Amino acid sequence: MTETIIDRCEARGLRLTDQRRTIARVLEDAADHPDVEQLHARAAAIDPRISIATVYRTVKLLEESGILDRHEFGPAPGPARARYEDADREHHDHLIDITNGEVIEFVDDDIEALQKRIAARLGYRLKGHRLELYGVPLARRDGRT
Amino acid sequence: MTETIIDRCEARGLRLTDQRRTIARVLEDAADHPDVEQLHARAAAIDPRISIATVYRTVKLLEESGILDRHEFGPAPGPARARYEDADREHHDHLIDITNGEVIEFVDDDIEALQKRIAARLGYRLKGHRLELYGVPLARRDGRT
DNA sequence: TTATGTGCAAAGCGTTTGCGACCCT
DNA sequence: AGGGTCGCAAACGCTTTGCACATAA
């Protein structure tokens, strides 16, 4: 749980280049769910040699290695930009604030269990799911945004 | 509930061309969740004049008019192909059989209510959601596929 | 009649890939 | 040393769009 992304790369025998180390660090530091363009901007700020092609190759590699999770939050039409987050965390789903695009993570054991039960009822064993809630902030008495 | 897609186009004042009528008919007859390529193939079988550009324009128009729902089932990487279905039906979610890509629809009031509650707990009013279950068929005693 | 829709082909966008140079192990 | 990786630019797959012609209302 406290292993760094680089630790996990080494554990899987992935070759560690300067670029990959930089991208791993950017991912490690990310509190949001950055897309490739954002990752590239942040990585290039540390090391301008990094090309966007390398970022694409690296996130794909890390995703296939189970180190990153990829998301495609909607509800934008067309090819949504993929966004990434560290996979080595407790499982959670996402609520997207449609007023500003903010992504809020949440954990709910009831809904996990319910999904499993629904799949079973339909004659399936659940292997994965995608759950995204889209909402607007409830009205509030103070003037905060 | 029993209004045809063409009825709904007229109700919204959309101009009805031969192409749109044909595409509407194909959508009406579809029991699956066809993508644009499939829609074009089926429409062109009825009227070969229809170009794929028109299919793209039409499904976009119908989606923006609330007549169609668009889905992007995963978990394929990259730009997933969009798939469409008639929006004028009881709300439901989807379970995708990852062994063959088959899409099974289901309705579950408990999970709908639970999602609303989760959003409220986080301080949001739920405006929409995306729920896709990915599963494999349970083992069975007979030899059927 | 005239605003809209259509077909065609080209452009757009996010992502992937072929290639020769380069680097980790 | 040598296979993996990189940067670059071209290619890709799905979708959108500019243009000239056709058509619904």
Image (tube, coloured by chain):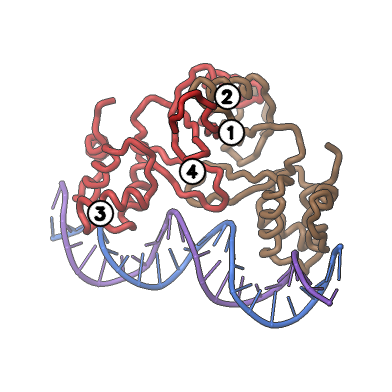
Chain colours: A red, B brown, C purple, D blue
Q: Give the answer, above or below, for where A9 lies relative to B121.
A: below
Looking at the rendered structure, the secondary structure element under dot 3 is helix
Relative placement, left or right, of A99 versus A1 is right
Query: In the image, residue C11 lies at what x, y percent?
Result: 51, 71
Q: Residues within 10 Å of mark 3 (few under 14, many from 20)?
A: some
Mark whose residue sits in front, 4 or 1: 1
Mark whose residue sits in front, 4 or 2: 2
Relative placement, left or right, of A32 versus A117 is left
Q: Give the answer, above or below, for where B29 lies relative to B115.
A: below
> Residue at 71% of width from left, 66% of height from top?
B51
For mark 1, name the chain.
B
- The amino acid type found where label 3 is placed reads Ala
Q: Quadrant of the C terminus of chain B?
A: top right
Residue closer to the observer: A123 or B142: A123
Q: Earlier in the sequence, mark 2 or mark 1?
A: 2
Q: Residues within 10 Å of mark 2 (few under 14, many from 20)?
A: many
Query: In the image, residue B17 lies at what x, y percent?
Result: 81, 63
The answer to whether marks 3 and 2 sit on the same chain is: no
For mark 4, name the chain.
A
Label number found at residue B129: 1
Residue closer to the observer: B40 or B131: B131
Discs 2, 1 touching: Cβ within 8 Å: yes
Q: Name which quarter of the figure residue B52 lies in.
A: bottom right
Q: Which residue is mark 3?
A: A44
The answer to whether marks 4 and 2 sit on the same chain is: no
Q: Which residue is mark 4?
A: A72
> Residue at 56% of width from left, 33% of height from top?
B134
Label number found at residue B115: 2
Q: Give the answer, above or below, for where A17 lies relative to A142.
A: below
Between marks 3 and 1, how big is the CA–CA gap? Answer: 35 Å
Query: In the image, residue B32 lies at what x, y percent?
Result: 72, 43
The answer to whether marks 2 and 1 sit on the same chain is: yes
